[in-house]
Image (cartoon, rainbow, N blue to C red):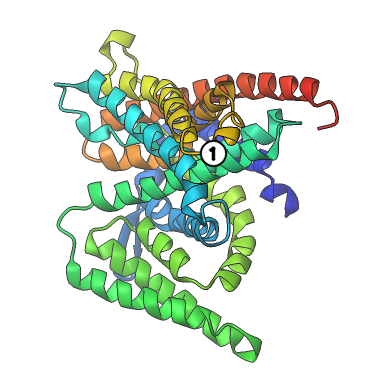
Amino acid sequence: MSIIRSERTAAGLLLGAAALGLLLANTAAGPALLAVQHAELHIGAFHLSVGHSISDGLLAIFFFIVAVELKHELVAGELNSVQKAVHPAIAAVAGVIVPALVYLGITAGTGLGSGWPIPTATDIAFALGVLAVFGRGLPNRLRVFLLALAVLDDLIAILIIAVFFTTDPNLVELLLAAVAVAVFGFLSRLLRGRMRWPIGTLMVLIAALTWWLVYDSGVHATIAGVALGLAMARGPAGRVTHALEPWSNGFILPLFAFSAALVVIPDVAPSQLSPAFWAILVALPVGKIVGITIGGWLGSLTRPREERGRISVLALVTIGALGGIGFTVSLLMNELAFAGSDDVRAEGTLAVLLGSSVAIVASGVLVSVLARRNRRLHPRA
């Protein structure tokens, strides 16, 4: 299982699954795969398509893991004080605002403004994977800064999903979900000794109930995973995420990437592609680089004068390019933003894949250059 926990392996599986999905969708197997994706599953009161079962159901487990990571960083990690958090926080916020503005500028007057959240997300697993592949010899502070920035980026993405992709929520069901989350968190503090299995089984049932209440309330169901991850006691949460991580890296995320990438490439001239396609394609790599570089520079001004040069402008540009790898959360945002338009959603998926690919290539080159320079300046590093 250790190889599946590797950031390099996780990034490779994600990219391979997305490429396979896009390839198969444009072969003779495409119609059959799309039919399976849209097939309805009837499980008791649930009526979900296979595709939504993946994006609304399985992906909640990924967001649970993200929430546990976020809580760890806020409580005991690189974001556990204002002094530590302010620099990556400014970079993360700028890395969300600038791509959103780029998207809105390109799509102005087209009626496609709802897609602005798509280029704001960073795929933390993929970004760390690229850094692991090409960054031999880089100082650990760059990985720490990227991790802190990406975790904050994930927090912003969670808030965007909760606020902007929720319409007319059922407040009673949300209140019941909140009670269920509180009970889940309380029980997690009793997980010890002989009571571990009975309590663990009860927690799984409560987690499933929470997911259903959130889903049925009108809020995107992945928020249930976030709430449960934040509520769970840190010790048990760490053990659970350690057990779930191989499943998330090796099955859930690749399956979601495969499903999301099942789009038929439109047989149209580039001039006929939706403005949303071009906006995402530009905003993901370019907007992230510009936003994170500017935000990172401004954030460095909050540090003591002797620490301001610890992360160079080239390093900030490199981290910005890594931040432009949207993939998982960007694909989810695309599904939510263009749920009512199959054509625009398909073009948005292509744009996310292409924009993220541009960011992968750019960040791979920049990380290699930065690592080579660091090894030359610090031969023993």
Q: Quadrant of the C terminus?
A: top right
Secondary-structure class at tag 1: loop
Q: Is residue 250 left or right of residue 67?
A: right
x and y percentages locating residue 133 in the rendered image: 70, 32
Q: Nearer the viewer, residue 275 or 50?
A: 275
In this rendering, the answer to whether 63 lies above or below 299 is: below
User: As shown in the figure, which amino acid type bears the numbered disc 1?
Assistant: Pro
Q: Nearer the viewer, residue 129 or 377?
A: 377
Residue at 46% across / 24% down in the picture? Answer: 289
Residue 125 seen from this side? no
Q: Residue furthest front?
A: 305
x and y percentages locating residue 44 in the rendered image: 33, 71
Report the number of numbered marks.
Answer: 1
x and y percentages locating residue 370 in the rendered image: 67, 22
Q: Nearer the viewer, residue 145 or 245?
A: 145
Q: Nearer the viewer, residue 317 or 221?
A: 317
Residue at 26% across / 58% down in the picture? Answer: 219
Q: Residue furthest right?
A: 380
Q: Is residue 159 left or right of residue 69?
A: left
* Res 197 quadrant in image: bottom right
| Residue tagged 1 | 304
